[in-house]
Image (cartoon, grey):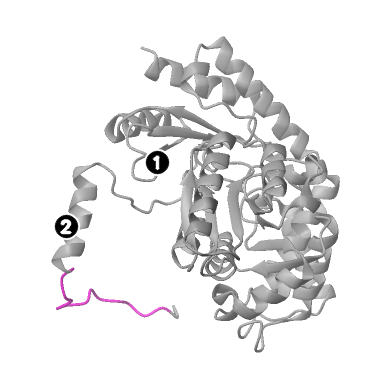
């Protein structure tokens, strides 16, 4: 007998308030309505599972075995980490992460979103300044909106605009009588909707010259760049010159959660003041074991080299098929073909999907109007034949 009770449709539910319904209607009119769809059986060119770790049975089995070895026979954390949820796997995993990422301390959050909201809502103080890249992730923007600091954007990856904005706002701050203040500069090592990267060395030089604090989100660099996937900052040997790094596990690591890397004092501050850390139930032991297993796999995996080979092959194929001018330049796993207009980009994506390839359209308002795009996520498990075929289809649909 099924344990599930048959659920009948509820009657008499209130309709959506007019203001909310109008917002939904506008999304429909603009062909921008988001909906939830089930995972398809198409060839994957859309997921963030860059190394195939999310479906790797060895990692799955290793996680299960680790839980048995640690006698972690529980399904949930039972509470926030400051109450009952701080089980021993947390301390063990954070020590491992601090060692691998060459930093003093690591603090695990439930997700990259929680980490960014927690950091930016609590660290910059009233009177401080935040300068952020105009294409920064929504989670960082949300955290900034919750902060009491003043925030200003600079042009994407534009070091000259950053310096101009930095000098302008610093002078204005001093004129207003605000003498003691911190300046926080925020960027990503790989941008999620463009796949490109800033000149991190120059960003650090600017921060050091102007005594600013630099924060870098490495969500899409973790597991892709650096020896054994440690990230782009460590590949460039710049990690010791950064105030804070945010690395996430839901992309190339194939599991869930995120970590903020920095000093012991920063960790202590976040434990005391980051509300998205304080007021939430901790991750279950399984999630912590999965993080450890993902990093264990990175130590001996050949998947990173396979991914890099596919990235190189993809970029060469763009030149051969005369598609290079349609794409934003990228050496990461994310490659974006600009196809303007929500309806147009959705139609092209649908044609490619009908031919067996899962390529997703990115529409406005997620990206600026006129910059709609097809987002190709490359993986270590994509074959050269698959890459060639999907680009052949793309050329047929966008160049005809």
Up-down relation of residue 351 to residue 281 (above or below): above
Task: Label the magenta part by its dominant secondary structure.
Answer: loop
Vertically, is 30 above or below 175? above
- Asked where in the image residue 274 lies, by quadrant, the reply is bottom right
Image coords of residue 73 (percent x, y): 73, 80
Kindly identify which numbered label has been placed on residue 7. Answer: none
Mark 1 or 2 closer to N-term?
2
Q: Quadrant of the C terminus?
A: top left
Task: Give the residue drawn at x 66%, y 42%.
Answer: 203
Q: Which mark is residue 22?
A: 2
**359 with respect to 258 (left or right):** left
Q: Residue furthest bottom?
A: 83
Comparing 173 with 263, the one in front is 173
Q: Label 1, label 2: how many angstroms apart (C-alpha)?
A: 21 Å
Instruction: Give how far across and how far down residue 122 sits, in percent.
Output: 56, 71
| Magenta stretch holds residue 373 | no
Percent coordinates x, y for residue 147 in the rendering: 49, 67
Residue 257: horizontal and vertical position, in percent?
63, 63
How crowded pointer 2 is (Cα within 10 Å; few <14, some 14-19, many 20+) is rated as few
Q: Which mark is residue 367?
A: 1
* Residues rendered magenta in the picture: 4-16
């Amino acid at each position: 007998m099924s344990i599930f009770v048959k659920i009948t449709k509820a009657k008499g539910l209130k309709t959506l308030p007019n203001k909310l319904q109008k917002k939904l209607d506008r999304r429909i009119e603009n062909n921008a309505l988001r909906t939830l769809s089930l995972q398809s059986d198409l060839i994957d060119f859309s997921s963030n599972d860059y190394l195939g770790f999310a479906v790797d049975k060895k990692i799955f089995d290793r996680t299960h075995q680790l839980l048995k070895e640690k006698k972690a026979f529980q399904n949930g954390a039972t509470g926030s980490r400051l109450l009952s949820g701080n089980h021993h796997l947390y301390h063990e995993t954070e020590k491992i992460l601090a060692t691998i990422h060459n930093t003093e301390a690591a603090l695990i959050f439930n997700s990259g979103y929680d980490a960014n909201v927690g950091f930016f809502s609590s660290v910059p103080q009233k009177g401080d300044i935040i300068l952020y890249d105009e294409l920064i992730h929504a989670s960082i923007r949300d955290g900034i909106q919750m902060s009491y600091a003043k925030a200003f954007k600079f042009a994407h990856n534009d070091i000259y605009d950053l310096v101009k904005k930095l000098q302008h706002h610093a002078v204005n701050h001093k004129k207003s009588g605000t003498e003691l203040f911190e300046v926080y500069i925020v960027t990503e090592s790989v941008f999620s909707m463009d796949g490109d990267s800033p000149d991190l060395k120059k960003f650090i030089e600017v921060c050091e010259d102007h005594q600013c604090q630099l924060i870098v989100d490495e969500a899409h660099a973790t597991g892709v760049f650096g020896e054994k996937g440690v990230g782009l900052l460590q590949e460039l040997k710049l990690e010791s010159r950064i105030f804070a790094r945010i690395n996430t596990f839901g992309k190339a690591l194939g599991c869930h959660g995120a970590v903020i890397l920095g000093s012991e004092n920063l960790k202590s501050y976040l434990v005391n003041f980051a509300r998205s850390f304080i007021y939430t139930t901790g991750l279950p032991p399984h999630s912590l074991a999965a993080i450890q297993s993902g990093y264990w796999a990175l130590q001996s995996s050949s998947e990173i080299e396979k991914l890099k080979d596919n990235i190189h092959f993809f970029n060469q194929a763009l030149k051969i098929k005369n598609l290079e001018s349609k794409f934003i330049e990228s050496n990461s796993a994310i490659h974006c073909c600009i196809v303007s207009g929500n309806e147009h980009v959705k139609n092209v994506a649908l044609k490619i999907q009908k031919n067996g390839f899962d390529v997703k359209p990115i529409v406005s308002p997620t990206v600026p109007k006129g910059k709609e795009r097809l987002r190709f996520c490359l993986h270590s498990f994509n074959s050269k034949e698959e890459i060639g075929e999907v680009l052949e289809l793309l050329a047929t649909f966008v160049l005809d």
